[in-house]
Image (cartoon, helix red, strand yellow):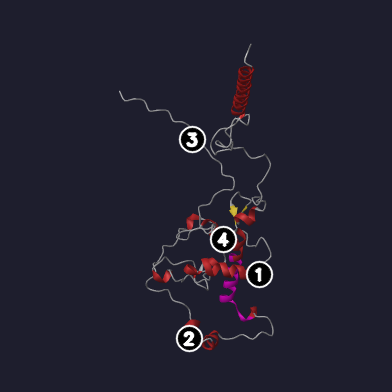
Amino acid sequence: MKDRGQGSRVRGQRGLGRIVALLGFAALFLVAGCRQDMHNEPKMIPQRGSDFFPDHRGARPQVLDTVARGQLHADTYFYTGVVPGPNGQREEPDQMPFPVTMTVLKRGQERFNIYCTPCHSRVGNGLGEIVMRGYKPAGNFHDQVRMVQPVSHYFYVMTHGYGAMPDYSAQLTPADRWSVAAYIRALQLSQNATLQDVPAGVQVQNLKDIARDENLPLSFAEPWALPSSAVQALPPPAGQGSPAMAPPNAAYPKISIPETKTAPAAAK
């Protein structure tokens, strides 16, 4: 006669073994189904390939005929300050790309006083503080050469720089560069105005009287002389052309490749 207690223990051990086996199989399936996304994130890494796209490139090309927001430079004159001329050369029109208001002039004055006065001074005569301390003389906006330059010329120089002057495209947005150019025109008018330019009914004050009322020295109203510490810059060669006295460059230059020359015969 069998021991019923022993049989129950055997059946219990078998049932427990089945449960353990089922749990083991379940754990195996769970491990096999796990991905390593938590450890290796499926992201696009620059300059690496990708199996997600058919061309296996992680960096995707731009969609054709699309422009990123804020990068539509449809008005080329606003962003360059030059237009293609009839002869293929770049030309600088003497016009602003937008109306000049008092707000534009005040913005130009603010930017000019920040970035331009160290070299050109507050009145634009080229005798700024660093020029008086040995830097090369800056351009005088009131001489005969710069008085006849188009307003877009100043925008072009601020964009690309010239000579000892670096470009200010990183410091000044295109709109601010145009505002500064408009303010330079206002400076030229203020220093070269005549009585005929004064509106009727407006009283003209003497500059020396203004200096006296503002407790400024009388020499404030006199022309500024170039200090002896300034370094005289050599005049630019006239053959460099324009704009910005840069070498002339056609709007669509033709690139020609010289023919390959035959190698000289070896000397006998």
What's the distance in space between the residues labelled 3 and 4, CA to CA? 42 Å
Examine the rendered structure and indicate whether residue 266 appears above or below residue 112: above
Tags 3 and 2 touching, CB below 8 Å: no
Q: Position of residue 211 (x, y in %)?
A: 52, 85
Is 193 included in the stretch rendered in magenta? Answer: yes
Three-letter code for the amino acid on which mark 1 is drawn: Thr
In front: mark 2 or mark 1? Answer: 1
Q: Residues within 10 Å of mark 1 (few under 14, many from 20)?
A: few
**Residue on which the image places disc 2:** 218
Q: In terms of secondary structure, what is the magenta stretch mainly?
A: helix
- Looking at the rendering, the stretch of residues picked out in magenta corresponds to 180-195
What's the distance in space between the residues labelled 3 and 2, CA to CA? 66 Å
Along the polypeptide, which appears first: circle 2 or circle 1? 1
In front: mark 3 or mark 1? Answer: 1
**Residue sitting farthest toward the left:** 268
The residue at the point 57 percent across, 64 percent down is 149
Examine the rendered structure and indicate whether residue 117 appears above or below residue 79: below
What's the distance in space between the residues labelled 2 and 4, CA to CA? 36 Å
Three-letter code for the amino acid on which mark 2 is drawn: Leu
In front: mark 3 or mark 2? Answer: 2
